[in-house]
């Protein structure tokens, strides 16, 4: 199926979108988070709502433009639902990133007041790498055998997530060992800088190591999340914008739920089920339904899988002992 928004004709939408993101990030870092501090739960919650609202406004604008451009409510509705589904999937899978953030910050002993800075630059790098992955994916998804291969990969990854405990010692990660071996580390730094020069010698700080590990982790996650959204839509514009919008809210979502992540005992099973579902959709269900599994069903199934895992986690969470 031909794309509704070929890049050669609609490059200005990509440019406008990136311009919007640049302005918002500049306001975020230069105004609201100019001074390093530990975000409060209220602040993190408000920022989370703001990022969600921004994604909703963009989706509304995309729906309105599609309706005006093509004069077809069915096409416009499909575009809107595909963006929403892609956003929900990326937001859902991003929960796994949040657990990784917590592990990385704990391992490198990053103070809370500097964690926002690390995440800001980490997510900025993630935007760049996601753009590369999506551009590559839009080309590869033209080949049916690659689509099937990615579908099988997602199923395998989902099953691995469900039955394999991946929360081992950070020292076991190969890239941690490489970083510590080849980069001169200065651990005594309370200024929140990535680099230091002492007596003419160049050193990196734990903040920089944490940033690199977060970037590597995101690249690994992108191998799953980008194909997962391509399972829901064939439009690179929707994949790109929904993916980026979901990533932008990761920092505030991390600070909002970092204090009670231990209560989400069963969330990984919900995430695993989502990966298995979109893998099945990519490798089998789309073909079984004449080339396109209904996007409304996809959205409902994804929400049900994640929602049920959250509800079950909250029901089974250990209650605080009364004194």
Image (cartoon, grey):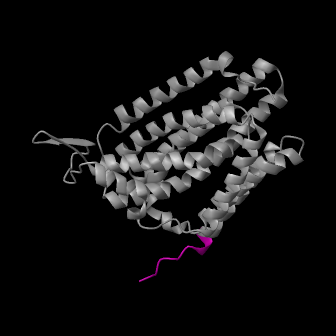
Residue 34, picture quadrant: top left
Tell me residue 9's x, y (percent): 68, 16
Please tell me which residue lies in front, 133 or 315.
133
State whether residue 2 appears in this view: yes
Q: In this orientation, does residue 53 appear? A: no
Indicate the quadrant where residue 95 lies.
bottom right
Q: Residue at x 60, y 74 (%)?
A: 316
Magenta stretch, residue numbers: 314-323
Residue 48's spot in the image, x, y percent? 51, 45
Residue drawn at (72%, 42%) of the image:
146
Locate the N terminus by quadrant: top right
Residue 199, placed above or below residue 270: above
* Residue 112 located left or right of residue 259: left
Q: Main secondary structure of the magenta part?
A: loop
Q: Is residue 252 left or right of residue 139?
A: left
The number of callouts visible is: 0
- Tell me residue 16's x, y (percent): 56, 21
Judge by depth and name the residue closer to the eye, 124 or 22: 124
Q: Residue at x 71, y 32 (%)?
A: 235
């Amino acid at each position: 199926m031909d794309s509704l928004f070929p890049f050669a004709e609609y490059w200005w939408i990509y440019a406008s979108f990136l311009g919007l993101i640049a302005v918002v990030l500049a306001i975020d870092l230069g105004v609201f988070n100019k001074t390093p501090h530990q975000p409060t739960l209220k602040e993190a919650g408000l920022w989370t709502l703001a990022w969600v609202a921004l994604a909703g406004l963009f989706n509304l604008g995309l729906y309105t433009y599609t309706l005006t451009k093509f004069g077809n409510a069915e096409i416009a509705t499909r575009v809107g639902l595909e963006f929403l589904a892609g956003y929900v999937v990326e937001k859902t899978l991003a929960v796994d990133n949040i657990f990784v953030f917590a592990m990385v910050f704990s391992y490198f002993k990053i103070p809370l007041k500097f964690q926002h800075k690390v995440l800001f630059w980490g997510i900025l790098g993630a935007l760049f790498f996601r753009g590369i992955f999506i551009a590559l994916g839009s080309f590869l998804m033209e080949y049916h055998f690659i689509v099937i291969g990615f579908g099988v990969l997602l199923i395998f990854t989902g099953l691995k997530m469900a039955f394999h405990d991946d929360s081992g010692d950070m020292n076991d990660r190969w890239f941690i060992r490489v970083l510590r071996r080849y980069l001169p580390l200065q651990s005594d730094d309370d200024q929140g800088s990535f680099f230091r020069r002492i007596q003419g010698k160049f050193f990196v700080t734990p903040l920089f190591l944490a940033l690199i590990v977060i970037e590597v982790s995101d690249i690994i996650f992108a191998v799953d999340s980008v194909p997962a959204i391509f399972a829901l839509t064939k439009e690179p514009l929707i994949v790109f914008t929904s993916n980026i919008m979901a990533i932008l809210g990761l920092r505030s979502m991390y600070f909002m739920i970092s204090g009670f992540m231990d209560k989400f005992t069963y969330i990984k099973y919900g995430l695993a089920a989502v990966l298995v579902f979109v893998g099945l959709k990519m490798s089998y269900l789309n073909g079984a339904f004449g080339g396109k599994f209904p996007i409304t069903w996809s959205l409902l199934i994804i929400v049900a899988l994640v929602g049920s895992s959250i509800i079950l986690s909250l029901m089974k969470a250990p209650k605080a002992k009364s004194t």
